[in-house]
Image: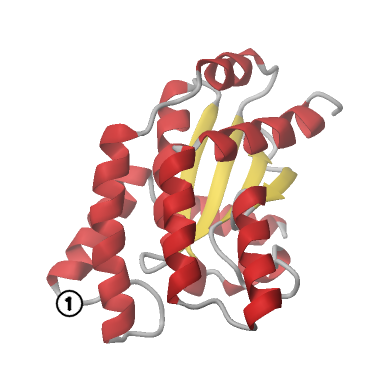
Amino acid sequence: MKNSIKNALRAGFSYSDYREHITTLLAENKTTGHTQSEVLLNYTQLNEARMNRLDKTLTVLPEVQEQLNAFPKSITWLVLAEGWCGDAAQILPILAKVADAADKVTLKIVLRDNHDELMNLFLTNGSRSIPKVVVLNSETEEVIGSWGPRPEPARKMIADYKAEHGVVDEPIKIELQKWYLKDKGETTQRELLALIEQNVLVE
């Protein structure tokens, strides 16, 4: 695990570099990942527009910023993502906002398909679901915990729909994006803060 984390941290993008990488690929009609298709390209184009909007509209909850800055240790959010992933497009902008606002938080982003070994250490019910946030002690690079791919209310929405309909199709994807829009990144911030509080403060 330690080697996988070290390699990922070494290769990790800052948020601005990640955004630039996506934009460069789109200019070549490409997306991230080993699989290229028109569908994934369209998702990536939509996600870029979505992230542009979120970068302008999302805000950090004052209590989250205050409590993160009060922690005794610095932390790193090492995030597995891909440009075509709709959930990643919703989550990464708020992680970037928090990392910019909180002195003790660093954000690094790696592409899932380029880091199989790391991804396989943080599966969700056996699935390579993203985004996956691996929370690290910045000094020791020890894993504090992990989070993702969605906030709990969104996870439940998708799980309930899939249980009833057997698929995750376009109607529920639209409802999911509406939920993200209404939530404004607040649940993600609170869930990550709770995870860190539960683990950092007991070390």
Write down the quadrant of residue 48 in the picture. Answer: bottom left
Which colour style is shown? Answer: secondary structure
Q: Quadrant of the N terminus?
A: bottom right
Q: Quadrant of residue 127?
A: bottom right
Q: Amino acid at mark 1?
A: Asn
> 182 or 112, which lies in front?
182
Q: Nearer the viewer, residue 191 or 82?
A: 191
Please give the name of the residue rendered at 60% of the width and 58% of the height, measured from the top-left corner.
Answer: 149
**Residue 98 to residue 67: above or below:** below
Q: Quadrant of the C terminus?
A: top right
Q: Is residue 117 visible?
A: yes
166 lies left or right of 100: right
Q: Is residue 127 visible in this depiction of the protein?
A: no
Relative to 54, is 7 on the left or the right?
right
Numbered label tally: 1
Q: Which sits in the foreground, 198 or 138? A: 198
- Is 111 rendered above or below residue 16? below
Q: Is residue 118 left or right of residue 47?
A: right
Residue 129 picture location, percent across and down:
60, 68
> Mark 1 = which residue?
29
Mark 1 closeness class: few <14, some 14–19, many ≥20 residues within 10 Å: some
Place of residue 103 in the rendered image (x, y in percent of width and height, measured from the top left):
49, 20
From the top left corner, tell me how far across and down residue 155 is, in percent.
64, 58
Give percent across and percent down for residue 113: 49, 74
Question: SS class of the residue under badge 1?
Answer: loop
At 64% from the left and 13% from the top, the residue drawn is: 70
